[in-house]
Image (cartoon, helix red, strand yellow):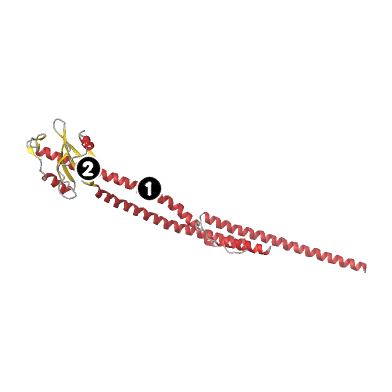
Amino acid sequence: MVSMKKTENKKTKVTGNKTPFFTISKKILALSLLPMIIVCALVATVGAKALETGIEKQIEQSLQIVGVSVDETYTNLYEGDYTRDKGGKVRKGGTSISGETQLIDGLQEKTGFQVSFLYGNMRLITTLTKPEGGRINGTALEDDVYAQIQTGEALFLTDCNISEVDYYVYYQPLINSDGSVIGAIEVATPMQNVKDTISMQVKDIILIAVACVLVAATLVSVLSRSMVKTMKKTKHFLGRIVNGELDAEPDEKQCRKKDELGDVYRISVKLQKTLRSIVTEIKDSADDLTASSNKLIKMAQDTQESVNDVYH
């Protein structure tokens, strides 16, 4: 029986001293940071998409400005419609523009955009080059792209592969006086530059989000430690009461706390005082009972002595 009690006490002691891995401070930290991490991830994802959309819109507008400028420049420099003569040269009015790359080369140098003049679905003159070098004059557009240009509406394409490079491309249709679409001005910029810009911006967003999470984690950790410290002091105080130390002095600093944990500590102190009062009353009652018992014993002894005197 004694050995079983010792075993139980030993088990209780081991269990009571074992610190769980997922402590309340870790729970508070997890509950506080998990929503923030989710929100930061969503902000980074949505922000990256919004950034990409915004940059693509700006690129479209920039390419459009160049395309319209080239169209208006040809219109202002040369009067008349676009035609192709018997020798295969393309003319604007009476002026041949085949092979004249000065205008598009100047724009390419100033803007960084690749510019092409398309007659029909073929690049008549262009600043675009092959991987091995040399311009890609005479290359044709894909049929579905050319079909959209033939509607006379401007066209903006993303992820358009030209000569093994992915481009953002804007097509400004070239329209003769009779309303016929004879070609287009093609303005392009590599996608990789935009992807690099977006990647840098997204990294900045992620770094800011991580910094916010770390700051929040630090604040939550400090606050949770303070809370856990109060709970440990309350636990220690209650443990002393359980062990019968009803004269244990409470921590005045914990008693002055104005939060719920302070309320719990003050209730623990009140419990100590109540138990001490009950124990004092029981002790006083026991002392009175002992005094009464002693009086009864004394009376019984006196009665016994009187009886003995009568018999003798």
Q: In terms of secondary structure, where does tag 1 sit?
A: helix
Left or right for 208, reference 240: left
Q: Position of residue 303 (x, y in %)?
A: 86, 65
Asked whether the viewer can see residue 256, the reply is no
Residue marked by disc 1: 42
The type of residue carrying mark 2 is Val
Instruction: Check disc 2 and report the residue beneath it.
Output: 169
- Tell me if label 2 and label 1 are in contact, CB under 8 Å: no
From the viewer's side, name the closer residue of 139 and 25: 139
Task: State how far apart marks 2 and 1 are (Cα).
Answer: 30 Å
Residue lying farthest top? Answer: 178
The quarter of the picture where residue 93 lies is: top left
Q: Is residue 3 above or below residue 211?
A: below
- Badge 1 amino acid: Leu
The location of residue 308, given as percent across then percent down, is 90, 68
Which residue is more in the foreground, 237 or 107?
Answer: 107
Judging depth in this view, the residue of 196 and 163 nearest the camera is: 163
